[in-house]
Image: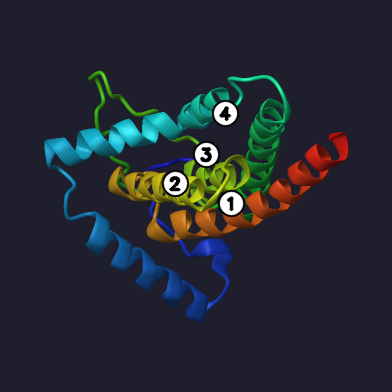
């Protein structure tokens, strides 16, 4: 599917939904597009997007949490694997179902430099970066402070995807909601498995 085609409503669900999504997209663009074109903001958005790409930042967090043998290591490994497999599968399934086109003017911010951003080739809804970030933030973290920090980073990932014009605002909102729901389900599974092994 071409990423250069003009946007269309999510799955053509009707005029009310299309109008709501367009309003959300316009509000997101008005808010997050203000800094686009400023070198520091473009570089920051590219860096955050790249850190989230393929889950590099979450692998780093899991390695830190698994640095000592024992229950915490088992939980970190199971949490990372569960979040990775689930977010990948759910993202693929929803993208195939919805088939939304990307913004027609995808920005190749950082292209040719050290922070080049991989150009998206899949459909737009939901944002896979955002879905995976929220899912993993919910599954992998422990305690309110750690969870809040991880969810904060996930929100910055979502903003970076709109800043780079890789997604509409409604794509990242959808990704955050789906990712959080998937993360809560996987977290319950991980905790049950870890409790059973102790």
Whether the residues at callouts 4 and 1 have beta carbons within 8 Å, the answer is: no
Report x, y in % for residue 133.
Answer: 51, 43
Q: Which callout, 1 or 3, points at the residue further toward the start of the chain? A: 3
Taking the spot 67% from the left edge, 54% from the top edge, the residue there is: 184
Q: Which callout, 4 or 2, points at the residue further toward the start of the chain? A: 4
Instruction: Identify the mark at residue 122; answer none if there is no mark.
Output: 3
User: Which image quadrant is residue 48 in?
Assistant: top left
In whole angstroms, how far apart are the C-alphas of marks 4 and 2?
A: 18 Å
Instruction: Identify the mark at residue 154; answer none if there is no mark.
Output: 2
Location of residue 12 with respect to 88 vertically, above or below: below
User: Which image quadrant is residue 140 in?
Assistant: top right
Which residue has dot 1 on it?
Answer: 179
Whether the residues at callouts 1 and 2 have beta carbons within 8 Å, the answer is: yes
Dot 4: what SS?
helix
Report x, y in % for residue 68.
Answer: 62, 20
Q: Residue furthest bottom?
A: 16
Q: Residues within 10 Å of mark 3 (few under 14, many from 20)?
A: some
In whole angstroms, how far apart are the C-alphas of marks 1 and 3?
A: 18 Å
Instruction: Identify the mark at residue 65; answer none if there is no mark.
Output: 4
């Amino acid at each position: 599917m071409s990423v250069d085609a003009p946007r269309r409503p999510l799955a053509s669900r009707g005029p009310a939904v299309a109008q709501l999504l367009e309003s959300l997209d316009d509000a997101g663009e008005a808010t997050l597009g203000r800094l686009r074109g400023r070198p520091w903001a473009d570089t920051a958005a590219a860096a955050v997007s790249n850190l989230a790409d393929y889950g590099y930042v979450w692998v780093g967090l899991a390695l830190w949490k698994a640095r000592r043998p024992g229950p915490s290591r088992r939980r970190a490994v199971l949490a990372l694997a569960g979040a990775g497999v689930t977010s990948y599968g759910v993202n693929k399934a929803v993208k195939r179902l919805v088939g939304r086109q990307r913004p027609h003017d995808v920005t190749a911010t950082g292209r040719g430099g050290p922070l080049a951003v991989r150009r998206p080739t899949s459909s737009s809804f939901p944002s896979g970066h955002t879905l995976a970030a929220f899912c993993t933030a919910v599954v992998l973290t422990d305690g309110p402070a750690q969870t809040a920090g991880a969810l904060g980073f996930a929100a910055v990932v979502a903003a970076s995807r709109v800043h780079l014009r890789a997604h509409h605002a409604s794509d990242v909102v959808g990704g955050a909601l789906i990712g959080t729901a998937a993360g809560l389900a996987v977290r319950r599974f991980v905790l049950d498995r870890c409790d059973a092994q102790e």
